[in-house]
Amino acid sequence: MEKVTVLKDKGNAALQAGKFSDAIKYYTEAITLDDNNHVLYSNRSAAYAKASKYHQALEDAEKTVQLKPDWGKGYSRKGSALAYLGRIDESIKAYEEGLVHEPENQQLKEALQGVRAQKFGNKGFANPFSTPDLFGKLRSDPRTRAYLDDPEYVKLVQDLQRNPNSLGHRLNDTKVLTTLSVLLGINLEATGDEDMDTAPPPTRKVPRPRSETQKPQAKVEKMDEDISPEKQEALKEKDLGNQVYKKKNFEEALKHYNRAVELDAGDITYLNNIAAVYFEQKEYKKCIEQCEKAIEVGRENRADFKLISKAFTRIGNAHMKLGDLYSAKTAYEKSMSEFRTPEIKALLSDVQKKIKEEERKAYIDPVKAEEEKEKGNELFKNGDYATAVKHYTEAIKRNPDDPKYYSNRAACYTKLAAFDLGLKDCEKCVELDPKFIKGWIRKGKFLQGMQQHGKALSAYQKALELDSTNSEALEGYRSCTVAVNSNPEEVRKRAMGDPDVQAIMRDPAMRLILEQMQNDPKALQDHLKNPDIAAKIQKLLESGLIAIH
C-alpha cells in the first residue's frame, strides 16, 4: 500500500496548490489500487467540489459515508456537495446525520448553521440583503461598521442584494457570516480569523444574553448608548487613521491612532494599528515593543483573545523580518495558544521548516561524514548491516549532497531485504549524480527484487548508456528481458491494469505508431524525436507491453 500513500500525498499537494485536475487524477489512481479506502473518496470529493464538479463530489461523498458510516467528515462532504447543488433540505439532513455520530464536531455544527441560514433566504423569508436602509444598519453595528470602509466588501453586499442565490457559495467567508448575524439577529459567525484591525468591539463589556424574541435592533441601540463621547471620538480617529493608512500616509495615520489612544487608552486595537504602521515603515523593533504594550493593555482590559493573538502574530512577523527565527516561532506559538487559525498555523509551520533547514545546514561537516562512512564500511564488511545503516545515515546528515553515501546505505538495505528503502536511496543517488552508474545498477536490482522488471530494464538501460560493457548492467538487462517476456499474457494483464498504459493504448495516434514500429523498426527513431511520444513509448517499455530488440 506504499504506492497508495504516495499517490494520496501527491493528490493532497496538488489540491493545496489549486491543481484540481491533477489531484483528481492522483486520487483516482490510488482508488484503483485500494477501492475500500474511505479517505481517498473523501479527498477526491473535496477535489471535485473545488473543480465545481458537484455531482461527482456528491457521489464520492456518498461512497465515503457507505465505507465509513460513523465518520463525520463523510457527512460534511455530502452536506457541502448537496448545498452547492441547491438541495438545501438534503444538505441539512446530511449535516444532522453527521452530528448524530459526532455530536461535538464543530465543523458540522458551523456548516449546518450556514445552510440553515441559506434556507432562510430561499424559502418563505425575505432576502436579508434587501432590508431597507441596509447600509445604515451595517454602519450602526460595531461588528460590520469598519467593513464598509472596504470597497470590496461594499461590492460583495451589492452582489448579494442583486443575486441572493449566490449566498450558498459565500458561506465560508467570515464577513458574510458576520453580516448575516447582524441582519438576521442570530449568531452565525464561524470560528476564524477576523480582518486585521478594522472592526474592534467598541467596548470590552461582556454582552448580556438576549431572549429569542428580542429584536436585534434593540441590541444595537443598547450598545450605542454604552459608548461614551470619548470612545466615539476615538473610533472616528481610528477610521481617519485607517483611511490614510490605506493611502500609505503612515505619519498621518500615526497621529490619528495616537490620538485615539489618548481618548481611549484601554482599547488594544489602536495600539495594534500603531504597530501595523511601524511594521510598514520597517521599524520592526518598535513594532514588537508596541505589540507587547498592546498585549499588556489587552489582558488588563479583557480584550478579545483574537486581538491578542493578532498582536503575537505581528510580533512573529517582525522577528521574521529581523531574521530571528526562534523568537518568531515562540511568538507564533503564543498566538496559536490565544486563537488558532489556518493562517497562523501555516506561519508556524513555515518557520519550523526554516529552523529545521538552518539546523540541517549547520550540522553539515564533510570531514565527519567521511569518518562515518569509513565506520559504516567496516561494519558492512563484518556483516553488521543494521549498525552500518546508522553510520551511513549519519554520513548523509553530515553531507547530504554526496551520492556515494546513499549508494552505500542502499547496499545495506539489499542485505536487509528492505527493498522500498533501498530504492529510495538509489533514486536519490542518481538524482544527485545522474552519471553514477552504481546507483542505476543498484536501482535495477531493487526493482528486480520487487518484481518490477519493466522498470528495472529502464534502470539497467541507463547504466548501459553510461558504460555499454558493464557486466552487472548487461546481466541485469538480460535477466529482466527474460522475465518480462516469459509469460506474455500475465505481462499484458498487469500492464493493462495501469491507467496510464490504458490511456496510451486508447490513443489512435499511438496505435498507428506501434503498427509502424512492427512493420518498419527504423520508423521508431523518427518518432522518438518527439518528447511526448518518446515518454509514452518508454512507459510501454517499462510495463513490458512492448520490447525493442
Image (cartoon, rainbow, N blue to C red):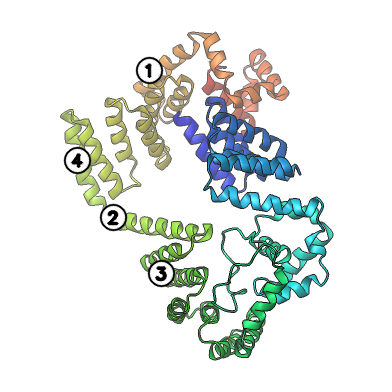
Which sits in the foreground, 377 or 277? 277
Task: Report the residue marked by disc 4.
Answer: 374
Residues at badges 3 and 1 in contact (C-beta under 8 Å)? no
Question: Where residue 475 is drawn, which disc sits there?
Answer: 1
Residue 176: x %, y % from top left: 69, 61
Query: x, y (%) of residue 195?
Result: 60, 68
Labelled pair 4, 2 in contact (Cβ < 8 Å): no
- Provide the secondary structure element on which disc 4 rests: helix
Mark 2 or mark 1: which comes first in sequence?
2
Where residue 317 sits: x, y (%)? 47, 69
Circle 4: residue type: Glu
How far is disc 1 from disc 4 in space, using C-alphas?
A: 30 Å
Real-space CA distance between mark 3 and mark 2, rounded to the nearest whole angstrom: 19 Å
Q: Which numbered marker is on residue 323?
A: 3
Residue 260 picture quarter: bottom right
Q: Which mark is residue 363?
A: 2
N-terminal of the pair, mark 1 or mark 4, is: 4
Per the image, label 3 sits on a secondary structure element best described as loop
Which residue is found at the position 40% from the left and 39% from the top? 428
Residue at 65 percent across and 27 percent down: it is: 527
In terms of sequence position, does the residue under pointer 4 or pointer 2 come before the other? Answer: 2
At label 3, counting other C-alpha atoms closer than 10 Å, the crowd grade (few under 14, some 14-19, many 20 or more) is few
Q: Are marks 2 and 1 in contact (CB under 8 Å)?
A: no
* Residue 48 pos. (x, y %): 66, 40
User: Of the residues shown, which amino acid type is indicated by label 1?
Assistant: Glu
Of tags 2 and 1, which is closer to the observer?
A: 2
Mark 2–mark 1 distance (CA, rounded to whole Å): 41 Å
